Image: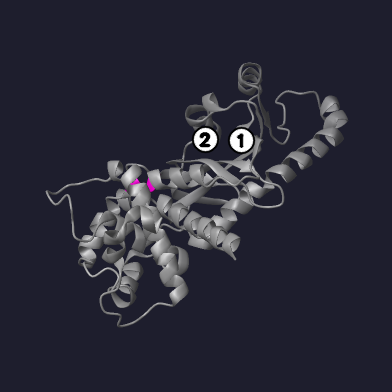
């Protein structure tokens, strides 16, 4: 990748005066991230950046901005913008001598939500592991919380957030839902095929029908009861060879004798389905452990919430993908 970029791009991030150095292994990670971001930016990200000034070629480039954000999140575990900026100014200024003021840094990062969303698509498309089972998918959602409490009212990013309820946490909250359709992988967490956000109040099945269902073919999907719809999935099985498998949902109006007679078989089936779909919960736990993505209480704008959500996903996958690449080389 160094040869592809040319010496002028290497010189751009080469330290001028090293005052406080980061470890050599982290310098290499910083360079690798920059090289990757530079390539993807030229290919697609630059078409998703919002420009609200005449300065189309700032000294501190968009590629550098994204590199700093991703590096600090993935390898320093700094997720607050102020922390990222402070670390960059203290330890990375010789690599990024044109670092702007904090206000400009924060403003520009919040205008990168479209580019970061495109970056996530690129990461999960081009770095798909070879062991993904294309015939078996898992799906679920998790809350992104801007405000928690039954009687609380969210006041941030109200254009895209609403009040919802998370049964897993037995909690009312304001915010978003993050929906993930993922490939099953044997013995490890699944790998996302599609990641979508919606308002917190939207029903999971409604989002799946609107955003994904028509594109699915030739697979089994393991999900929670909320995704159950016999009529809808019966048609999809006929038309697209898609089978939705969920724990057995109580049938309204069913005779109690039939319910009792079928209970053992239904419980066994439900347990089997839940066991297969459980890794999607492990994926969400991993994502939250790596980035604290669920807690968005400090976000102060719609753009900020979008960067918080998709940015944390990008950070987690930069860490996962580059860590795996390093393991392969050792």
**Secondary structure mostly taken by the magenta-highlighted segment of the chain:** helix
For label 1, the residue is 226
Picture quadrant of residue 262: top right
Query: In this image, 96 relative to 192: left or right?
Result: left
Q: Residue at x 71, y 47 (%)?
A: 186
The magenta stretch spans which residues?
A: 113-117
- Helix or strand or loop: what does disc 1 sit on? helix
Check whether the beta carbons of the residues at disc 1 and disc 2 lie within 8 A of each other: yes
> Callout 2: few (<14), some (14-19), or many (20+) C-alpha neighbours within 10 Å?
some
For label 2, the residue is 203
Instruction: Give the residue furthest to the bottom.
Output: 19
Q: Position of residue 267 (x, y in %)?
A: 81, 38
The quadrant in which the N terminus is found is bottom left
Q: Residue at x 36, y 42 (%)?
A: 160
Residue in the foreground of this view, choosing between 231 and 316: 316
Q: CA distance from mark 1 to mark 2?
A: 8 Å
Q: Position of residue 75 (x, y in %)?
A: 46, 67
Q: Is residue 230 visible?
A: yes
Res. 245 mark: none
Q: Position of residue 122 (x, y in %)?
A: 44, 44
Picture quadrant of residue 105: bottom left
**Label located before the other in sequence (1 or 2):** 2
Q: Is residue 114 magenta?
A: yes
- Helix or strand or loop: what does disc 2 sit on? loop
Q: Residue at x 24, y 55 (%)?
A: 108
Q: Residue at x 78, y 41 (%)?
A: 272
Query: In this image, 38 relative to 285: left or right?
Result: left
Query: In this image, 26 relative to 159: left or right?
Result: right
Residue in the foreground of this view, choosing between 153 and 113: 113
């Amino acid at each position: 990748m160094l040869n592809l970029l040319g010496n002028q791009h290497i010189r751009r991030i080469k330290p001028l005066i090293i005052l406080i150095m980061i470890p050599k292994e982290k310098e290499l990670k910083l360079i690798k991230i920059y090289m990757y971001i530079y390539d993807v930016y030229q290919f697609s990200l630059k078409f998703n950046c919002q420009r609200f000034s005449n300065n189309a070629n700032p000294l501190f480039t968009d590629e550098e901005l994204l590199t700093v954000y991703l590096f600090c999140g993935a390898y320093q575990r700094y997720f607050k913008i102020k922390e990222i900026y402070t670390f960059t100014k203290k330890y990375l200024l010789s690599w990024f001598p044109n670092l702007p003021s904090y206000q400009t840094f924060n403003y520009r990062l919040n205008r990168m939500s479209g580019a970061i969303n495109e970056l996530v698509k690129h990461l999960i498309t081009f770095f798909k592991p070879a062991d993904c089972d294309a015939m078996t998918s898992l799906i679920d959602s998790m809350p992104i919380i801007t405000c928690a409490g039954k009687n609380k009212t969210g006041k941030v990013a109200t254009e895209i957030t609403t009040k919802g309820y998370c049964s897993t946490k037995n909690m009312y909250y304001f915010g978003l839902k993050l929906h993930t359709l993922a490939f099953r992988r044997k013995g490890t967490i699944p790998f996302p095929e599609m990641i979508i956000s919606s308002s917190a109040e939207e029903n999971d099945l409604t989002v799946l029908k609107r955003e994904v269902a028509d594109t699915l073919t030739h697979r089994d999907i393991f999900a929670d009861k909320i995704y159950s719809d016999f009529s809808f999935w019966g048609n999809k099985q006929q038309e697209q060879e898609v089978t939705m498998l969920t724990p057995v949902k109580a049938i309204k109006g069913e005779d109690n004798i039939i319910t009792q007679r079928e209970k053992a078989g239904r419980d066994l089936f439900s347990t089997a389905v839940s066991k297969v779909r459980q890794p999607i919960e492990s994926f969400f736990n991993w994502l939250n452990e790596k980035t604290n993505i669920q807690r968005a209480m400090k976000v102060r704008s719609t753009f900020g919430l979008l960067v918080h959500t998709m940015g944390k996903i990008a950070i987690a996958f930069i860490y996962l993908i580059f860590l795996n690449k390093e393991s392969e080389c050792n």
